[in-house]
């Protein structure tokens, strides 16, 4: 009986320690799925360059060449240009490797959604313009917020147009009434 029990235990051990066949395929599938990750990458502007330009604009305001509103608009434009340059540096790095793919961007706020190997994604932190790796859900939230904000702007513009149209119609009705009275 001890021999029979021993055989059953060996068979059980053999089954539980089996590392061939389907189990290896499952492990390979898991490794393949883990080889790719998706994160949002936040880029920043070259702070030294931005500070220089900011100082130049401040001097123009002090000399009366620009007013505050013009200076603010110029700073925003420069910031957008510098963000575009930073995004271009990230895109260039992604183009240089097969391990990174940019799937979506929000250049106006300096975010890119990137697929890649974990090692390649971490290496993007070596790019001077890259400020942070952010969970991909953050990118999706920002994209949804940007879309909602754009929709609100369109709705507000449409409402403003409707108000102008209604005022014009009211003026036409008043003119018709005035003509009828005379």
Image: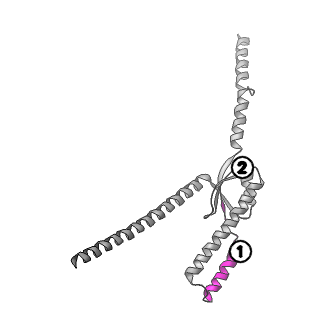
Residue drawn at x 73%, y 31% is: 24
Disc number placed over residue 67 in the picture, else none: none
Residue drawn at x 70%, y 78% is: 52
Residue 103 in the image: above or below residue 64 = above
Front-lying residue, 162 or 45: 162
Residue 153 in the image: above or below residue 12 = below
Disc 2 secondary structure class: helix
Say how the picture is coloured.
Answer: one colour
For the residue carrying disc 1, how many other residues have a C-alpha within 10 Å: few (<14), some (14-19), or many (20+)?
few
Disc number placed over residue 118 in the picture, else none: 2
Front-lying residue, 148 or 31: 148
Separation of disc 2 and disc 1 at Cα?
Answer: 31 Å
Circle 1 residue: 49
Q: Which residues are magenta?
A: 42-62
State the image coordinates of residue 34 (x, y, percent, origin top left): 69, 43
Residue 31 is one of the magenta-drawn residues: no
Quadrant in the picture for residue 173: bottom left
Quadrant containing the N terminus is: top right
Most extreme residue toward the top, as rendered?
A: 1
Callout 2–callout 1 Cβ contact below 8 Å: no
């Amino acid at each position: 009986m001890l021999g029979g029990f021993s055989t059953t235990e060996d068979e059980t051990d053999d089954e539980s320690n089996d590392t061939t066949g389907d189990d290896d395929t499952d492990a390979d599938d898991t490794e393949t799925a883990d080889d790719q990750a998706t994160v949002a990458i936040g880029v920043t502007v070259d702070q030294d360059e931005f500070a220089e330009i900011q100082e130049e604009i401040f001097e123009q305001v002090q000399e009366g060449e620009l007013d505050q509103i013009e200076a603010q608009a110029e700073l925003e434009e420069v910031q957008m240009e510098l963000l575009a340059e930073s995004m271009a540096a990230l895109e260039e790095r992604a183009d240089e490797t097969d391990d990174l793919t940019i799937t979506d961007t929000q250049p106006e706020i300096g975010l890119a959604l990137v697929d890649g190997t974990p090692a390649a994604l971490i290496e993007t932190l070596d790019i001077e313009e890259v400020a942070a790796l952010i969970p991909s859900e953050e990118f999706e939230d920002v994209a949804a917020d940007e879309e909602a904000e754009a929709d609100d702007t369109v709705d507000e513009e449409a409402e403003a147009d409707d108000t102008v149209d209604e005022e014009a119609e009211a003026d036409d009705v008043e003119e018709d009434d005035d003509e009828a009275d005379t």
